[in-house]
Image (spheres, rainbow, N blue to C red):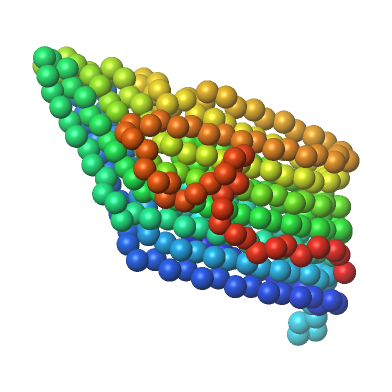
Amino acid sequence: MRAHINLLQKVIMVSLLLSALILSTHAEKITTTVGTNNTDWSITRQSDSIKFDYSQYVQGSISPVEYRGRSLEPYHSSYEEVDVNDVRLRERTSARRGDYASEGVILLRADSANSSEFVLSIENGTFMGEFKEEWPAILRSRKSLRYSGQGINSLEYAGNNLDYAGSSLLYNNELSKDSGIDMLITRMNATVQGISLAPNDTVLSAQFMPTKETHYSITMSSTGIADFKYGFSSPNAELKKSIYPMASEGEERYYGNYNITRSIHMKSDFPRYEEEDDWISCCSAGVYEIGLPERKALSLP
């Protein structure tokens, strides 16, 4: 995971608070491949036992800087990126001269202490491989942004295994955005089945079945281009293309001045055994019971 902030500005009124805590104790990576004469199926999983807390508050004016007798063109750029057990978060912001205020928090909990296993059985000319994993992870993010100036781009992406949602807000002279992301994975099961009769060994079907939940929400006012995308995956693979297709997906684009509120909730559950106590307690609508700091009421300088 990476968090990078680059600010080049003459401060008229600025407040910057940044804190991060990372505790990592254990990491696992497993790659499993089933190969036949006609088709290959593989899966790679990686996780850490990790606790990560991040918070930031910035308010100021992006303005020229005098350096060695010349005036440097001002800009602001930042990015955040997290990827644990295929739960992913990416955020990018770049802005030219103007008034800027933002606040963000990220919270991550992951546990790879439990083992993963792959069992392959062959009977009566057929085979079945079962991959079982219990590496839970939860990721929560909140971001608020206010901008007025020569132009700003703001992008964010949430990916939970094969599901995704996000937005691209481009070429805005005025932008206000409040967004929230909650993602949870508790376990993953995958199966592959085929014929085991040489010389025609063949994979017939494969399923990727994580028990996961994603909630993405955004409220924003845009004066440029606003793109929104989402995808909800099917558990059944298309073997000829070696992909898992989307069961549902969508894309929208808006040009001009818009006020938009958008909320997406995606969930899949593949129980394979009697449920035990949840690793992390949760409640309805994808909002999980791990507290985030309260956000300030943002305003421009």
Q: Left or right: where does residue 153 sit relative to residue 279?
A: right
The x, y position of residue 197, in whole percent, is 12, 15
Query: At 40% across and 46% down in the image, what residue appears?
Result: 277
Quadrant assignment, res 6 = bottom right
The x, y position of residue 235, in whole percent, is 42, 26
Q: Left or right: where does residue 103 sit relative to residue 182?
A: right
Residue lying furthest bottom: 68
The x, y position of residue 191, in whole percent, is 29, 28
Query: At 27% across and 45% down in the image, what residue appears?
Result: 116
Q: Left or right: where does residue 271 sit relative to residue 292?
A: left
The C terminus sits in image quarter: bottom right
Task: Please tell me which residue lies in front, 54 or 6.
Answer: 54
Task: Please tell me which residue lies in front, 46 or 254.
Answer: 46
How many numbered discs? 0
Quadrant assignment, res 70 = bottom right
> Visible in this render: residue 172?
yes
Query: At 72% across and 44% down in the image, what residue appears?
Result: 218
The x, y position of residue 68, in whole percent, is 76, 85
